Amino acid sequence: MKSSSENYFVELSKIDVNNHVEKKGQFSYLSWPFAVSQLRQFDPVATWHVQRFDGLPFLNTDLGVFVEVSVCVKGISLSQIHPVLDSKNRPILAPSSFDINASIQRCLVKAIALHGLGLNLYAGEDLPLIEADDDKGAPATDKTPTTQPAPATVTTLPTPRGDTITPAQVGYINKLIKETGTELQKVLDYFGIARIENIAKTEASRVIRSLEQARNRKEAA
């Protein structure tokens, strides 16, 4: 057990999790038994709590179903909210008990990651990339559609001159978009911009990293 005077986040973030990452479709997940085991070995009195909503372990909203898990390490409690998603990371509006349980386990792992363990696995996952194509590059158009809420209206905000990405970054991002089959409009809508050129400099590395990860997943498929 580490001394309370040390930065426990740094210690947990040093733990190698690569051999315990599971692949489901195009997404990678850290095994929850491994995450719990490492957490309890590091802090034997670490605890976690599944939030209840009117006695139920999930919250049903117009936007989807959500779960929340808080994890306490070294006396510090951090909470993570997670939507109930399908295998393509799309919200499930009428989930089964299995879907909810799986989401709680994923939420638990993410709440543990807030304390450092496996946090690097989630870099870039918040960018709205489309699903990888089927074999031989054919679009996955034969899948059963899932009912989704209507997309929110996005207001394009002006970006101050001098705070946008360089022409070289624009060219590389456009190249990655073509290589991954990403929907350009989804990226534009996410950032509330009209053109790739308007992406802020502070967001450039996150966009590129996410697209590179999508490209690697596609090449490995």
Image (cartoon, helix red, strand yellow):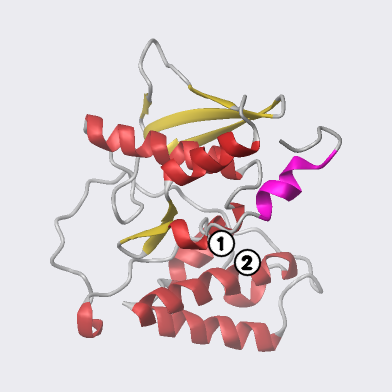
Question: Which percent across, then down, holds residue 217?
Answer: 40, 74
Instruction: Identify the residue position indicated by label 2 in the image.
Output: 206
**Label 1 vs label 2: CA separation?**
6 Å
- Quarter occupied by residue 140: bottom left
Residue at 43% over, 84% down: 178
What element does badge 2 sit on? helix
- Residue 127 lies in magenta, yes or no? no
- What amino acid is found at the position of numbered circle 1 in the picture? Gly
Question: Which percent across, then down, holds residue 160?
Answer: 78, 66
Residue at 16% over, 61% down: 143
**Residue 95 seen in the current view:** no
- Residue 12 lies in magenta, yes or no? yes
Residue at 35% over, 16% down: 56
- Quarter occupied by residue 67: top left
Question: Which percent across, then down, holds residue 6?
Answer: 83, 40
Q: Which residues are magenta?
A: 6-14
- What amino acid is found at the position of numbered circle 2 in the picture? Arg
Tell me the crowding category of disc 1: few under 14, some 14 to 19, or many 20 or more residues within 10 angstroms, Cα based.
Answer: some
Q: Is residue 78 left or right of residue 59?
A: right
Q: Earlier in the sequence, mark 1 or mark 2?
A: 1
The numbered dot on residue 124 is: 1
Q: Is residue 1 left or right of residue 186?
A: right
Tell me the crowding category of disc 2: few under 14, some 14 to 19, or many 20 or more residues within 10 angstroms, Cα based.
Answer: some
Q: Quadrant of the N terminus?
A: top right
**Residue 101 seen in the current view:** yes
Question: Which percent across, then down, holds residue 211?
Answer: 51, 73
What element does badge 1 sit on? loop
Q: Are marks 1 and 2 in contact (CB under 8 Å)?
A: yes
Choose between 219 and 188: the one closer to the eye.
Answer: 219
